[in-house]
Amino acid sequence: MIGGDREGPHAGASTGGPIPGARQVTAPAGGLDVAGVGVSFGGLVALEDVSLRVPPGSVVGVIGPNGAGKTTLFNIICGFVRAGSGSMTWEGRSFRPRPHDLAERGIARTLQGVGLFAGLSVVENVMVGAGAHARAGFASALLGLPRSDRDERRLRAEAMTVLDELGVAGSAEQLPGALPYPLQKRVALARALVARPRLLLLDEPAGGLGGEDMDALGALVRSLPERVGGGCSVLLVEHHMDLVMSVCDQVVVLDFGRRVATGTPAEVQADPAVTEAYLGAEVPAA
Ligand SMILES: Nc1ncnc2c1ncn2[C@@H]1O[C@H](COP(=O)(O)OP(=O)(O)OP(=O)(O)O)[C@@H](O)[C@H]1O
Ligand SMILES: [Mg+2]
């Protein structure tokens, strides 16, 4: 069945008292709230009445068979797609996302694939990911405009710090195309993290990764809520069940645009509705 025999570190976390070794998710207020969201494309209902919550300091996974609506939900939260119904709240305030001001709101995302600028070095790619103000400085630096060198040096130093955290500082001056794919994915992640987001949206971050890189990604995602200098919560859209089950505090299962289950990894794995959602659909190998 899904996730094999993996129980994950958070198994049974909602069944009673604290689980030894399990990190407790605190603060019911704040974070991201998605309430009753729906959207149709022509006659096709892609999402219907979907709700989920990403509490501060948590990792929440969204899974479901192909076409279930995972990417559509991700796109609604990023503002790429406008919801036809429902509402969202971010850090206690009504939230109408627009892709260009996500960074200012403390939200970052990575897209499927890598999407790096081929003509910029690794460190420059990461510098681009910094906030709007910093980006303006970076742009003027590129154009040779008389702007503070100090700003650019600070930005570069921040980019190097994140690259170092992700183990790719040694490739900072290379072009992304020269790096193996798993390293390119890390650079893309560094670009999302350099602005120190409070929420990170990851769309299939494990796509194209093999065993060891997948393990490293899992450890990294798990560490994000407690990062030095400001942790962030994570919403993880992912096909790889082992990864989802081992890193998530909560999992939301979509099927045909509806939420069919939600709970801890252990609860979701034991839910017959989830089994049913996957019947007939081959579960991708982890
Ligand atoms: N822009 C769009 N226009 C029309 N239909 C769309 C659009 N985006 C998504 N859909 C449809 O909405 C449904 C949900 O698609 P979505 O991409 O969200 O699924 P998914 O769960 O991400 O699937 P996968 O696991 O294959 O990536 C599908 O039937 C898809 O064809
Ligand atoms: Mg998708």
Image (cartoon, rainbow, N blue to C red):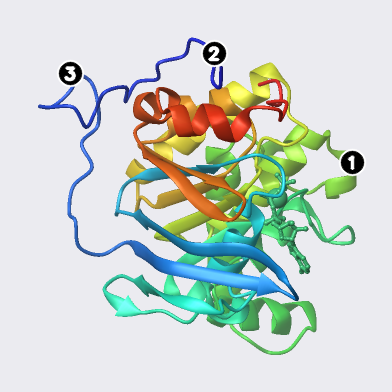
Left or right of residue 39, residue 92 in this image: left
> Residue 125's image quarter?
bottom right
Q: Mark 1 points at which residue?
A: 178
**Ligand 1 found in image quarter:** bottom right
Question: Which numbered dot is residue 20?
Answer: 3
Q: Nearer the viewer, residue 68 or 157?
A: 68
Which tag is nearer the camera, tag 3 or tag 1?
Answer: 3
Q: Distance between the residues labelled 3 and 1?
A: 44 Å
Residue marked by disc 2: 4
Query: Viewed as shown, does residue 97 lie left or right of 127?
Result: left
> Residue at point 18% right, 22% down?
19
Quarter holding the C terminus?
top right
Q: How many labels does the image show?
A: 3
Local secondary structure at mark 2? loop
Residue 156 appearing in the image: no
Q: In this view, does 188 lie above or below 33?
A: above
